[in-house]
Structures are given as structure tokens and as C-alpha cells.
Amino acid sequence: MSNPISRKQIEKALQQKGFVPDQTGRDHRYYRFYYKGQKRLSKTKISTGTGYKDYDDNLFRLMVAGLHLENIKQVRDLLACPMTEADYITILVNRGKLQP
């Protein structure tokens, strides 16, 4: 298993890449991806409970589908910042989830 990523770093990375907090529940925050001002299908939930200060591959596995990515490595790349917003948009376009 790879190194965990802190919840704080995850939320910062999401916001840097066009995700916007959409709603906040008691135990989680939801983020949606916006492109050219339009809400898209990409979304993810960040748990804010004390047991979720760091995320590992088990939680990243749950994020793959909501982010329309293919695997945990892509989720890690998105959240640890080797993947840029432009790279993410290219993936969404290539997967047919977003019109350029």
C-alpha cells in the first residue's frame, strides 16, 4: 500500500483543479467538478470524521468511479498533484464524460 495523503492536502488539490464544495453534511464534504461554469458528473465525498485525517488506497478505491478515473494511481496523481486540471479534463474528454 502506498503512502496516505492527508485530508487537508486532498481538499486543497481538489479545489486547485476546479472542484467546488457543493454541500456539507455533518460528517462529510462533497466536491463537484466545474468546467466552463457547468456542473459536471464528477464528484467526490470527503469524510471529516476523526478517523479520516489521512486517506489510503482503500478510500481512493471508493473515489475512482465518482471522479471518472480508471484506477487508484490516477486518483493519487490527481490528489498528490502530478496530474494537472488540464490533464484531468483530457481524461474526462477521452472517457466521454465531458465535451471539450
Image (tube, rainbow, N blue to C red):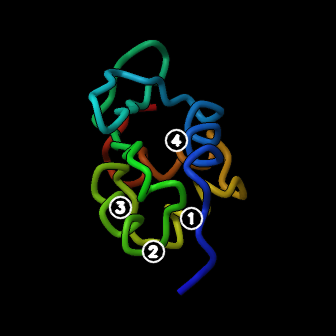
Quarter of the image where one finds residue 39: top left
> Label 2 neighbourhood size at 10 Å, few (<14), some (14-19), many (20+)?
some
Q: Which residue is mark 1?
A: 76
Confirm whether residue 86 shows in the render: no
Q: Which residue is mark 2?
A: 57
SS category of the residue bearing label 2: helix
Q: Residue furthest right?
A: 82
Position of residue 32 measured from the top left corner of the image (x, y, whole percent): 38, 30
Confirm whether residue 11 shows in the render: yes
Position of residue 3 measured from the top left corner of the image (x, y, whole percent): 63, 76
Q: Which residue is mark 4?
A: 89
Q: Of label 1 and label 4, which has the lower sequence position? A: 1
Instruction: Identify whether 8 is placed above or below 63.
Output: above
Give the foreground label among 2 and 1. Answer: 2
Total numbered badges shown on the rendered structure: 4
Q: What kind of residue is marked 1? A: Arg
Residue 64, disc: 3
Position of residue 6 measured from the top left corner of the image (x, y, whole percent): 61, 55
Q: What kind of residue is marked 2? A: Asp
